[in-house]
Amino acid sequence: MLTNFLWKTKTKSPSTIDQTMKKIGYGLLFIVMSALLWYLFIKPSDYTIRFEVNAIPGTINQTLKLWDQTLDTVDKIKQQGDLYHLSQKVKFGDSTHTYHWKIKRLTDSTSKVLVNIRDVNNSLINKIQVPFKENDFVRRSKKTVLDFMETLNNHIDKFKVTIVGEEDIPSKYLAYIPIEVTQLQKASGMMKNFSFLTGELYSHNVGLDGPPMIEVTRWDMDNDSLHYNFAQPIVRSEKLPIGTDIQYKRIFSKRALKAEYNGNYITSDRAWYALIDYAKKNDIEVIPKPVEIFFNKPMGNDDIYWKSFIYMPIKEADE
């Protein structure tokens, strides 16, 4: 009798088992349908591409913005809150594709890039086809991202950044011209004013005191806007040209993180990002107003042989 009672209490009737299985089935069906609905109608991308590259996020960010200018874009590439997230809209015939770039730093010299891509006009059909075949959208996406990867790798081969460590920015008396440009136009602003600045100083027999340099006074990393003084260190005298666009000031020695940059001066800001990354890694608070000193007059040498020193001022306790 006791054994029969225990058996009855420990077993379930076939109808109870059927009900349990139905509940499990309904639950699984709900999960599958929810996932399918999310994938087809809510998921923001139709296709995702991932790759790793030997570059820091700042270099990838700026190369993306330069590469974007070579594309038939609906809107200029935009930074989404920080330099690690960017979005762009690119036209391919009658289609418009959105590219959302996410950059993640892996090591001191490597990063991982994730690209979420969506065809604005054909998103649903792409989501249906992509898991089963490589359609035109997928081929176009791969070709476009591969084009950027080749552009990035070619650029990486043309410059080198070497972190030197802490040094003092040299004290100098400057003749300078204030310039406001986008970050990509930094070098063109220098070239536009170089002949005028040096010509005026030469015509007044002003003694030079070192190679030309720039002193950044404002750097908006979100909008890539840049205010800087393009300067020529000089020996202070009474012969200075007055009544022109040239202004004068002294910069005083200040502790800074220093890097040597070898490469075209157009992209010397790659060293700015390297110094900021180095500062973060070593818990050093810096002021994002770099100073650059240019040692080579670019006259046809390979870019890698051009040299400049980059200083990122270290923030002091009272600043």
Image (cartoon, helix red, strand yellow):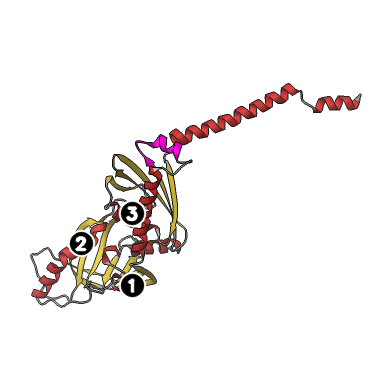
Instruction: Find numbered disc 2 in the image and state the secondary structure of the residue it sits on.
Output: helix
- Is 78 situated left or right of 112 in this image? left
Q: Is residue 300 magenta?
A: no
Residue contact between numbered discs 1 and 2, judged by CB atoms under 8 Å: no
Q: What is the three-letter code of the residue carrying label 3?
A: Leu
- Is 142 situated left or right of 17 in this image? left
How far from the left and from the top, in percent, is residue 268?
A: 30, 65
Task: Name the residue located 12 percent from the left edge and 63 percent from the top edge.
Answer: 245
Image quadrant in which the N terminus is located: top right
CA gap between label 2 and label 3 equals 19 Å
Q: Please state which of residues 135 and 144 is positioned toward the viewer in this rendering.
A: 135
Q: Mark 1 points at which residue?
A: 168
How far from the left and from the top, in percent, is residue 41?
A: 44, 33
Q: Earlier in the sequence, mark 2 or mark 3?
A: 3
Instruction: Find numbered disc 3 in the image and state the secondary structure of the residue it sits on.
Output: helix
How far from the left and from the top, in percent, is residue 39?
A: 47, 36
Image quadrant in which the C terminus is located: bottom left
Q: What is the three-letter code of the residue carrying label 1?
A: Asp
Task: Name the residue located 35 percent from the left edge and 38 percent from the top edge.
Answer: 120
Q: Find residue 283 and name its label.
A: none
Instruction: Find numbered disc 1 in the image and state the secondary structure of the residue it sits on.
Output: strand
Q: Name the residue under label 3.
A: 64
Start-end of magenta stretch:
118-129
Q: Does the magenta stretch include residue 126?
A: yes
Which residue in the rendered view is the most extreme toward the right?
Answer: 1
Q: Mark 2 points at which residue?
A: 188
CA gap between label 3 and label 1 equals 33 Å
Mark 1 or 2, closer to the camera? 2
Q: What is the three-letter code of the residue carrying label 2?
A: Ser
Residue 303: quarter of image = bottom left
